[in-house]
Image (cartoon, rainbow, N blue to C red):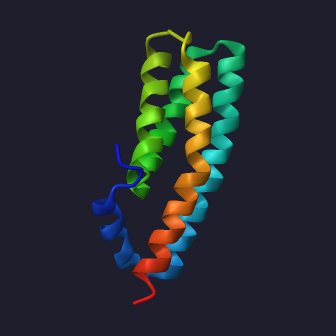
Amino acid sequence: MEMLDTEVLAELSALGEDDLRALIDMYFEDVTSQLDRLRSALGDGDADALAAAAHRVKGASLSIGAARVASLASELEVAGQANDLGGCDALLRAFESELDPTREALSAVLAVEFSR
């Protein structure tokens, strides 16, 4: 799976550089907040809270074009909905490991898109 959804990013580029940069910054602020909720929910064994936080991250990720993060969030959501938290530690680690590369990839897209 590709890290970014280029079709979504192409649509978002119509916002202009400043607005898109602000949107990306807000996205990462929200994802960081939800990451804390995901960790807490998993630590508490709260499958419902895990599913809810993962659902929020999935939606935000899809809307910003962060396809791989959205996919991992979806897996966490499904696991939470099924009350099957067994493999969620590894999923959460994979999710966390995708955040910095996704931020870098989005920054690179901004640099290329608006350097023209």
- Left or right of 68 on screen, residue 43: right
Quadrant containing the N terminus is: top left
Answer above or below: position of 6 versus 19: above
| Residue displayed at 56% across by 36% down | 95
Answer above or below: position of 47 versus 100: above
Residue 33 place in picture, x, y as percent: 67, 44
| Residue displayed at 65% across by 19% down | 42
Residue at the outermost left position = 7
| Residue displayed at 69% across by 28% down | 39
- Left or right of 57 on screen, residue 9: left
Front in this rendered view, residue 53 or 91: 91
Number of labels in the image equals: 0
Quadrant containing the C terminus is: bottom left
Answer above or below: position of 75 versus 10: above
- Left or right of 38 on screen, residue 91: left
- Left or right of 36 on screen, residue 116: left
Q: Quadrant of residue 70?
A: top left
Q: Quadrant of residue 11?
A: bottom left
Residue 47 place in picture, x, y as percent: 56, 15
Front in this rendered view, residue 18 or 106: 106
Front in this rendered view, residue 15 or 109: 109
Residue at the outermost bottom position = 116
Residue 43 place in picture, x, y as percent: 72, 18
| Residue displayed at 37% across by 69% down | 12
Residue 23 place in picture, x, y as percent: 52, 66
Front in this rendered view, residue 76 or 116: 116
